[in-house]
Image: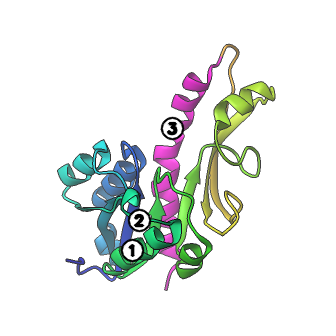
């Protein structure tokens, strides 16, 4: 059942859910329900075997699974996903490691209330393998970006960024771990700021 909050947040995941957990824990610690009338109503995954679902349940959040493999097309999956999400009447839909490219129809349906975190300092390094590409380009800084989602991949308006240095001897793995620490700080703050900006 949808939660009673006025500003429901639905989080989509495909993996371990570490960014999801950072948002949920921050919402609970800061009492977003009291501050904004907001709360995480549900976590939805396209994979039943992901650890993020168990993590969400341990944090007291309702979970749902909708496998993309059960659908013949991306459009059919996105239509079913929209129906599932809309059951929670979301004020905000948060992509937290949701590894699906969304159709324009889905993105347009949630225009202005669909956000993502990307592991680079956009507009640099859209797409995949961001950390290795930053190292290969001899960047002195890398980082992460929270942005609104548009039909063009990783090109929506930037809401927040955090930078980390690229250190001598960094590998994609060591740089990724350093960026992830910042993601866990940046994403909850960006969601907080978005909620604060709403009437």
Asked whether residue 195 is drawn in magenta, I would say yes
Which of 4/136 is in front? 136
- Magenta run includes residue 193: yes
Q: CA distance from mark 3 to mark 1?
A: 31 Å
Please name whichever residue, 9 or 106, is drawn nearer the observer in this view of the structure: 106
Q: Is residue 36 visible?
A: no
Sequence-wise first label, 3 or 1 = 1
- The structure residue drawn at horizontal position 73% and vertical position 26%, both measured from the top left corner, is 135
Give the residue at mark 1.
Answer: 80
The residue sitting at the top extreme is 169
Give the image quarter of residue 101.
Answer: bottom right
Residue 71, disc: 2
Query: Is there a contact, CB below 8 Å, between mark 2 and mark 1?
Result: yes
Q: Is residue 45 above or below residue 170?
A: below
Secondary structure beneath disc 1?
helix
| Magenta-tinted stretch | 170-199
Residue 190 against residue 128 in the figure, above or below: below
Q: Which residue is mark 3?
A: 180
Quadrant where the N terminus is found in the figure: bottom left
Taking the view exactly as shown, the residue that stands out farthest to the right is 137
Earlier sequence position, callout 3 versus callout 2? 2
Q: Position of residue 120 (x, y in %)?
A: 66, 43
Magenta stretch secondary structure, dominant: helix
Is disc 2 placed on a helix, strand or loop? Answer: loop
Residue 138 visible in the picture? yes
């Amino acid at each position: 059942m949808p939660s009673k909050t006025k500003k429901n947040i639905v989080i989509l995941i495909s993996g371990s859910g570490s960014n999801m957990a950072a948002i949920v824990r921050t919402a609970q610690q800061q009492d977003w329900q009291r501050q904004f009338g907001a709360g995480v109503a549900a976590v939805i995954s396209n994979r039943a075997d992901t650890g993020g679902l168990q993590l969400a349940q341990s944090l007291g959040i309702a979970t749902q699974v909708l496998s993309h493999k059960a659908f013949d097309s991306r459009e059919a999956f996105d239509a079913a996903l929209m129906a599932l999400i809309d059951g929670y009447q979301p004020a905000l839909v948060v992509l937290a490691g949701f590894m699906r490219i969304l159709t324009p129809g889905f993105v347009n349906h949630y225009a202005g209330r669909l956000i993502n975190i990307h592991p680079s300092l956009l507009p640099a390094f859209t797409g995949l393998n961001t950390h290795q590409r930053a190292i290969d380009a001899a960047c002195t800084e890398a980082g992460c970006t929270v942005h609104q989602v548009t039909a063009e991949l990783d090109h929506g308006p930037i809401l927040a960024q955090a930078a980390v240095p690229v250190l001598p001897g960094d590998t994609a793995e060591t740089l990724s771990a350093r960026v992830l620490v910042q993601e866990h700080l940046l994403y909850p703050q960006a969601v907080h700021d978005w909620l604060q900006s709403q009437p």
